Image: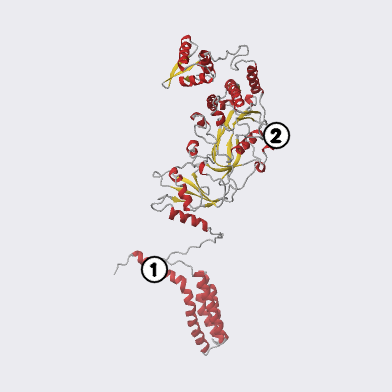
Amino acid sequence: MSERTPTAEVSRTMRRIAFRQRYRMTMVVPFAWLIALPLAAILDALPIHPAVSALCAAGAAAVPVVRAVRGRRHIAAAAFGSAWLVVSSAAGPTGLVVEVGLAGWLVLALLHWRTHRRLPVPGRPEPVEEPEVVVEQVEIDLEVARILRRFDERLSAKGKALDGMTMTTPKRIEAGYRSEIRAVPGEKETKDIMQAAGRVASAYQTTTQLAVLEPVPYGDNSRAMFTLLQGDTLSQVRRFEDIQPRISKDGRAHIGYFYDLQPAHWAFFTKSGGMRHGIIVGDSEAGKSRSVETLLGLAHLSPVLTTVLLDPQGGSMPDWNGHTHRCALGEDDCMGELELWNYVMRRRVRHIASIPWVDEDGDERRGKTHLMPGDPDTGGMTGVFFVLEEAPELLQNDVHGKRAVGMLASGAKTWRKGGGGIVLVAQDPNMTELGGSVTLRAQLRKNACALRTQTPGAAYQMGLPYDPSLLPATFEDGSLTQGLSYLNGVDRRAALMRWLYTEKPKRIAWEPPAGRFDPITGGYIEEFVDAKKAGRDPGQGKGKAAQPRSTPGDVKQAIVDALADNDGKAMELGDLLHAVLKRRVVAPPSEINAALKRLLKDGRVWSAQQHGADMYFLPEDVKGL
């Protein structure tokens, strides 16, 4: 037998005490009845007067009554017992007296039990009074369970595409359901999840347009955001006129909706960097021109922007031809307009770099790093929004192509400071379409939009997670997917979206524009036009005539002109020979080389080593290099 410990003994004692507290009065009431009934019978049977019997009974009951009053417990029971004993001693414990006594004792026993039934008993868990809670009844979403089950069975099981990964409980959003897919940190990363997009869509028996993966917005490289759409959320055509978006003070404008019906934005400019460039690519009938119309409409309605449309084809945007601030149609006119703005933007950059202004501390400053459109410190100079439609028509032109590529590549790096934003429109972002300029393509990716393309590769070239060549031509209901694209820009989401399109672009284009060229820019435009009319080089002073142009037999002058037309940049020998021959100079390469050597000897042309190659430039261009 086990030895009894003091703790066990105390526990048993506490149990006995609790038993007495809980059950004693309940059991005493019936026993008291059994004692009081014979006592009343004996007192009634004695040969004494009833009054004496009642007095004896009252004396016997006085003790429990006094104890009850002093202890302030069981007073009702003691009073009832005493009264019944006195009455029964005098009248006899028979008939109605017995019935009243029995009923009274039973009622008192039940009341005691009700009061003491919840007293704690040592060794047993004490019942806890739970507060009353109102539970809201919600409908159980069976789709959530289905999404989780399919993920566990078809994607995260051993040997599956997302082996060992987990999914958070999907939450209901307007467009469908959204959750996170989480990899083990340090083992897998977001791109590993993104590469399984096709498998994920297959697991849910849908398309990659309805089962969408994208990086989480807070930058955790071990997770991806998963959205399962319940239908083609972008199949509905949403009109520009219904929403009436405008360019905000921070330069952003609502241009469409992402797949989850969140607004998509285009950044025309930012406070920290000024005007922003962009590129739009897409196949025929994918919606390029309609997308450009949306951008032109927004710029047309902004008081701090002016618009310039360059259309080498001449008929891409009939509603806007002649209705922008400046417009050039055809390859030759576009090249002339590009030359004008190359001059004007250089002048604007120099002007902004020397403008006096006062900062927020009250200190006088000189020069700004870039133009913020409408900045009062610059006299309210407007930003210039350039659109080059069908860009390959100009960039691949036999006569103007190479020079146009050079100007635009240089402009993409420098025009932003002077308030110039360039948007190129092409069918594909490959190097052939853009004249072979890696610099140009890289500078335009701040706003990168890819509609459906003919060939794969645009995803890598534009920093997009998905291949736009896989975008469908129609939605499930048979409607065209014009405007459906991937957008990577100011929203920090490289995600599927659809553009807002104007119902009738001419209604906006034919209205007077909200912005206008500031007097400074207007003066620079007049300078260029007047110089051209007078046969002078716009880069020279008004009183100095332009240098004579080369003739077919003047090889030296052709070399000088080719270097002068290269915007102050040095040229490799091969590029220089090509530029001279394009001027229809009838001379073999050996004669051009000989002329170049004579120019070097005379000091009219200088050379220098750059990246292991001989580069040639004019002495007056030394400051610009």
Residue type (three-letter) at the residue carrying disc 1: Thr
Residue placed under numbered mark 1 in the picture = 13
Residue 409 drawn at (x, y percent) = 53, 27
Could you tell whether 43 is left or right of 522 in the image? left
Alpha carbon of mark 1 to alpha carbon of mark 2: how far?
101 Å
Which mark identifies residue 472?
none
Identity of the residue drawn at 60% across and 17% down: 538
Residue 125 drawn at (x, y percent) = 43, 64
Which mark identifies residue 510?
2
> Is residue 52 visible to the viewer in this orientation of the structure?
no
Q: In the figure, 531 relative to 101: above or below?
A: above
Which one is in front, 299 or 583?
583
Residue type (three-letter) at the residue carrying disc 2: Trp
> Is residue 226 visible to the viewer in this orientation of the structure?
yes
- Check disc 2: other Cα within 10 Å, few if <14, some if 14-19, many if 20+: some
Work out which residue is located at the far left of the displayed protein and give it: 1
Label 2's element? loop
Identity of the residue drawn at 47% across and 51% down: 202
